[in-house]
Image (cartoon, grey):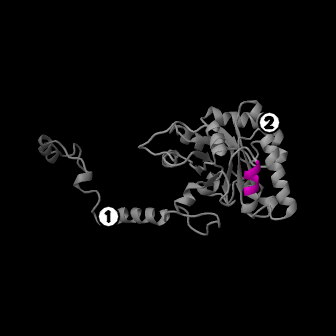
Amino acid sequence: MSQNSETPIERITIPTLLRWKREGRRSVMTTAYDAVTAHIADRVADIILVGDSVGNVCLGFENTLSVSVAMMNHHLEAVARTRPRALLVADMPYLSFHVSREEAIRNAGGFLQRGADAVKLEGGAKRAEIVRALVDCEIPVMGHLGLTPQSVNVMGGFKVQGRTADDALRLLEDAQRLQEAGCFALVLEGIPAELAARATEFLTIPTIGIGAGPDCSGQVLVLHDVLGLTEGRRPKFVRAYADGFHVLKEALSRWAADVRNGAFPASEESYRLPEDLGDTIANWTPSNPT
């Protein structure tokens, strides 16, 4: 059941998501990067991801590789201050879990100390050891397979994955290894729908699809994509439910026009002096006129 302000529900937890998987109930995940987007997302979503997609969406980078732990901490803290009911997941950015086991634990643990309920990291079976190390430290981990944006250079761009027999079987094996390592859920991005359906069928943990067809345990889209807040070409898997960019630009344009023609602010947006001060102000003169 989606949450809203009229019918508050208990906080979403990892056991909640695992139970929903058994019951066949789909979960909704979206992103938030500040308090405003967190308040919007928490009215609807079951999972809020503070994604390293902040690099593309908010910070002007071409990809996620330039996003640092410090940047993630800044945006995570803003979202966490809203105390969302949704499960709050923080992305592990590039190089935050690649250098050493100890550094991965330190970075992921820092996210939990700043309010995250779990972390998400990209990669298949080769990340299983890191996943185990984090889970051993009581840090819940969501995995991410398929089109993994941090591997954009290796993949030669943002391309659909798992389209050959070897790649498809490798993805299924990776999914199994990550579940065995302790992941509580897997994001499946940019893979054929049939492959995502097969993974969802045999895994006991939920799958969250993005460009992976309709048969996953849940779906995730970047909030700005759902609201149509970005211009330009959108990925095939995005469906915008509003033309947010032009709606907001039109509102801002109307305000700017009112400023320029003197219609803003009007009396209802202005403060007034008490009546007995009117003459005092009117009769005031500078003490050192020039």
Viewer can see residue 147: no
Mark identifier at residue 47: none
Residue 42 percent coordinates (x, y) = 51, 45
Report the front residue among 165 and 155: 165
Q: Is residue 216 above or below residue 119?
A: below
Q: Is residue 57 above or below residue 236?
A: above
Q: Is residue 171 left or right of residue 86?
A: right
Q: Is residue 182 left or right of residue 170?
A: left
Residue 121 percent coordinates (x, y) = 73, 45
Name the quadrant containing residue 197: bottom right
In magenta, the rendered stretch is: 197-202
Report the front residue among 104 and 146: 146
Q: Kindly give the residue lying farthest to the bottom in the view shown.
A: 233
Name the quadrant containing residue 12: top right
What residue is rendered at 46% in x and 39% in y?
A: 8
Secondary structure character of the magenta stretch overall: helix
Mark identifier at residue 258: 1
Residue 85 percent coordinates (x, y) = 53, 39
The amino acid type of the residue labelled 2 equals Arg
Mark identifier at residue 132: 2
